[in-house]
Image (cartoon, grey):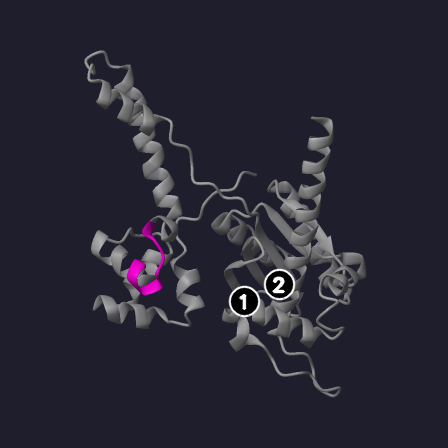
Amino acid sequence: MPFVPLPNYLRMFRKRHNLTQGHVASLFKTGGTTVSRHEQSIRVPILERALVYEVLFDVPIRFLFPGLFERVRKDITRRARILLKRKHIRNSRQAAWLRMLAAQGPMRFLDFRVLAIDITSNGFAYLVLEGSERLVEWQLVYISPNTISAYLLRLRKIISQYSPEVLVLQEPKRAHHDSRSREILEKFKLQGRQCGLKTFCIDRTKVGLRFQRCGKRKHDIARKISVLFPELRPKLPHPRRIWETEDNRMNLFDAASFGLTALRELEKRQGQHRSRRRRNA
């Protein structure tokens, strides 16, 4: 599945700055519904509000709305090619300008978009990563009714919304879950393959090797992830005592550790592929 830019990254940057939709709406002097519609791409903001987003997040509009930018670029490129075929364009400057527009390529995206999931007792935690430095979305999902079909329906919605290239799960055979959770992981793996995603199953041993400098405890790894992604810091639970049950928020950090471990493996494979190409050249 080719990398498809998301319509916008407004939600990501808003959550990164720890802002609510109400905070952003107060700058527009409007309701939170308008911001929600912008984030869900139900409505495209007018130029003045798009500029407010640029000032607020200190990010150029083309990177806040890459999907919209790509759509406009493709349309302009197509129109420029049509104009070039018309015979009445004789001005050399006009022709050179149109050729430049017609030759424009898409924005370059070098990173993989990864959907990483960790199963919980009543749902799952998921993160969407673009490379190892950009956290697009993170959420704890509670599934009701608690059926496998409901799990799969929610997974399909997430895949449709974020168009990931890679699905990362915990290795079902080595997961410390009950038989039902392992069945859900197997169904998720099958669903990912049916959607054309590269599917990685990561076990705890690989995670330990990836984060071996941080410590062996899950909380040590979670603390390191909260340093890599400061937006996850409010979700970091306190270290678990022996008599306490694990905080559900820890599943977010487990999913992040699976995703980052899979990205490390992908980077290694790409490096090996490039070295083979150089040797064969």
Main SS of the magenta part reads helix
For the residue pair 190 and 243, the one nearer the viewer reads as 243
Per the model, the C-alpha gap separating discs 2 and 1 is 10 Å
Disc ID at residue 159: none
Q: Earlier in the sequence, mark 2 or mark 1?
A: 1
Q: Which residues are magenta?
A: 54-61
Mark 1 crowdedness (10 Å alpha carbons): few <14, some 14-19, many ≥20: some
Residue at 50% over, 70% down: 231
Does the segment drawn in magenta span residue 56? yes
Q: Is residue 170 left or right of residue 112?
A: right
Report if the CB atoms under discs 2 and 1 are less than 8 Å apart: yes
Disc ID at residue 229: 1
For the residue pair 232 and 149, the one nearer the viewer reads as 232
Find disc 2 in the rendering and name its residue. 256
Q: Is residue 160 above or below residue 98?
A: below
SS type, badge 1: loop
